[in-house]
Image: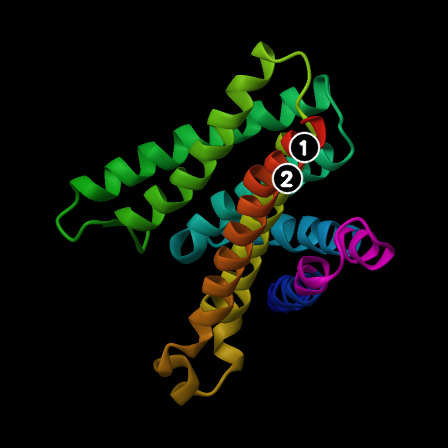
């Protein structure tokens, strides 16, 4: 079990490094594509291990199961969006995410009804936070049957935010989750380990604005 935990943390840490490279590289270039593929592969392994560890250590790590499933769904749907894929694979990922969302809402509600506001060692807001991310993905999936195709900018935005949320989960595991034990106590208490997660969200918002707002203006200007 210790080996699996180390493998989970190690692959998560390498996924963070690959994600940082993909996010900072020129979009669509060779470095971005290569780092993105590495990130997706590492995240699949790390998230799968995290989900398994959550199941076999349900007394203390159960929420890790749902975080792992969520990360897998986000990365898979983001990867499919990059490939402009449609059909059964997208639907299967969407159904798994929807089931995970329902479970997180139920678990959060159970935690909220307890005296200390927690269930299996985790507060209700932890379950609801993950449910919020799963809900955003489910809402985006629900619009797909009503669209024949996604526009290029919306396809890129779908790929971008799902990969970034998966990146956010990986960074959380590496810096403020299980991986935090590798850092000195003083650093853990300083709050600095939360900075990578904040930077990921800031970078995601920057690129979403650039893709959805400025790319649209550029297209409009070229048509005009």
Magenta span: 19-36
Residue 22 % position (x, y): 72, 58
Residue 215, numbered label: 2
Q: Is residue 156 above or below residue 18?
A: above
Q: Residue at x 57, y 58 (%)?
A: 170
Q: Residues within 10 Å of mark 1 (few under 14, many from 20)?
A: few
Residue 198, numbered label: none
The image quadrant that residue 87 belongs to is top right
Q: Quadrant of the N terminus?
A: bottom right
Q: Which residue corresponds to mark 1?
A: 219
Q: Residue at x 25, y 36 (%)?
A: 109
Res 73 seen here = no
Q: Is residue 62 above or below residue 197?
A: above
Q: Residues within 10 Å of mark 2 (few under 14, many from 20)?
A: some
Res 32 seen here = yes
Q: Are marks 1 and 2 in contact (CB under 8 Å)?
A: yes
Residue 65 % position (x, y): 51, 46
Pick whichever, 160 or 51, lies toward us. 160
Q: Is residue 20 magenta?
A: yes
Q: Is residue 29 above or below residue 94?
A: below
Q: Residue at x 45, y 68 (%)?
A: 176
Total numbered labels placed on residues in the image: 2
Colour treatment of the image: rainbow
């Amino acid at each position: 079990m210790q080996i699996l935990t180390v493998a989970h943390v190690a692959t998560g840490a390498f996924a963070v490094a690959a994600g940082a490279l993909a996010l900072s590289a020129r979009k669509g270039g060779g470095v971005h594509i290569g780092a993105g593929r590495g990130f997706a592969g590492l995240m699949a392994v790390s998230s799968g291990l995290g989900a398994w560890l959550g199941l076999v250590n349900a007394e203390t790590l159960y929420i890790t199961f749902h975080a792992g499933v969520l990360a897998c769904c986000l990365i898979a749907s983001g990867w499919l969006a990059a490939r402009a894929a449609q059909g059964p694979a997208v639907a299967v990922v969407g159904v798994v995410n929807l089931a995970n969302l329902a479970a997180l809402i139920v678990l959060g509600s159970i935690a909220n009804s307890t005296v200390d506001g927690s269930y299996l060692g985790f507060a209700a807001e932890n379950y609801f936070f993950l449910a919020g991310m799963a809900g955003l993905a489910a809402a985006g999936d629900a619009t797909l049957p009503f669209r024949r195709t996604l526009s290029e900018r919306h396809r890129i935005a779908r790929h971008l935010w799902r990969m970034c949320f998966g990146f956010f989960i990986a960074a959380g595991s590496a810096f403020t989750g299980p991986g935090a034990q590798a850092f000195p106590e003083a650093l853990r208490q300083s709050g600095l380990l939360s900075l990578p997660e904040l930077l990921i969200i800031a970078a995601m918002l920057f690129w979403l604005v650039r893709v959805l707002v400025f790319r649209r203006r550029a297209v409009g200007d070229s048509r005009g």
